[in-house]
Image (cartoon, rainbow, N blue to C red):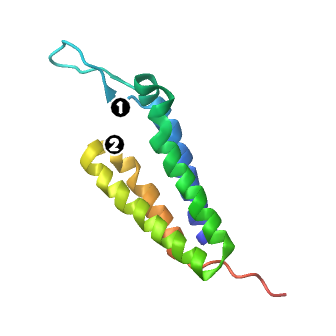
């Protein structure tokens, strides 16, 4: 179960990077009163606009590596880090509003993976 959750979380992290490069969420100043044009963060801010999504993905990889060590200190560190990502994703709701709903599942998947029981080796 833990491997499935980690795989889903990392896939969601990659999706966040792709969406931040392709989804138009940054508003463009214009003189139009009714429609406000939008552009991707990659267009608006350059490569620096992708740093938050890459940061989340790197954090997910770090949590995964800690969980794979299967030591109690590593597992505790992974759980604390996963909870921090979840808290930060909920905090981003205040800043990014509706777009943060894409980040919250990532944090939830990481917490679920960190607290899921690890797979035991099969005995034959």
Look at the numbered disc 2 and give the secondary structure of its residue.
Answer: helix
Q: Residue at x 48, y 69 (%)?
A: 112
Q: Residue furthest bottom?
A: 124
Q: Earlier in the sequence, mark 1 or mark 2?
A: 1
What residue sits 48% from the left and 39% below the top? 51
Q: Tell me how far mark 1 sits from mark 2, CA to CA.
A: 8 Å
In front of the other: 59 or 103: 59
Q: Is residue 95 left or right of residue 3?
A: left
Residue 105 point in image, percent of width and height = 42, 56
**Residue count near mark 2 (Cα–Cα under 10 Å), binned few <14, some 14–19, many ≥20:** few
Residue that carries the numbered disc 1 in the rendered image:
25
Q: Position of residue 123 (x, y in %)?
A: 80, 87
User: In which quadrant of the rendered view does residue 69 lie?
Assistant: bottom right
Q: Which residue shows up at 28% across the image and 50% down it?
A: 93
Q: Secondary structure at mark 1?
A: loop
Residue furthest top as drawn:
31
CB atoms of marks 1 and 2 within 8 Å: yes
When the figure is inspected, residue 46 is found, relative to residue 84, above or below; the finding is: above
| Quadrant housing the C terminus | bottom right
Where residue 43 sits, quadrant-wise, is: top left
Count residues near mark 1 (Cα–Cα under 10 Å), then give few for <14, some for 14-19, many for 20+: some
Check disc 2 and report the residue beneath it. Answer: 99
């Amino acid at each position: 179960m833990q491997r499935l959750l980690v795989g889903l979380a990392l896939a969601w992290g990659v999706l966040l990077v792709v969406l931040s490069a392709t989804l138009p969420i940054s508003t463009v100043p214009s003189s139009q009163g009714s429609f406000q044009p939008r552009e991707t963060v990659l267009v608006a801010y350059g490569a620096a606009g992708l740093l938050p999504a890459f940061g989340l993905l790197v954090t997910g990889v770090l949590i995964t590596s800690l969980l794979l060590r299967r030591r109690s200190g590593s597992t505790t560190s992974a759980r604390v880090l996963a909870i921090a990502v979840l808290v930060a994703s909920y905090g981003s709701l205040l800043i990014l509003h509706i777009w943060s709903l894409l980040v919250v599942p990532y944090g939830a998947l990481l917490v679920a993976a960190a607290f899921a029981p690890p797979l035991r080796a099969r005995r034959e």
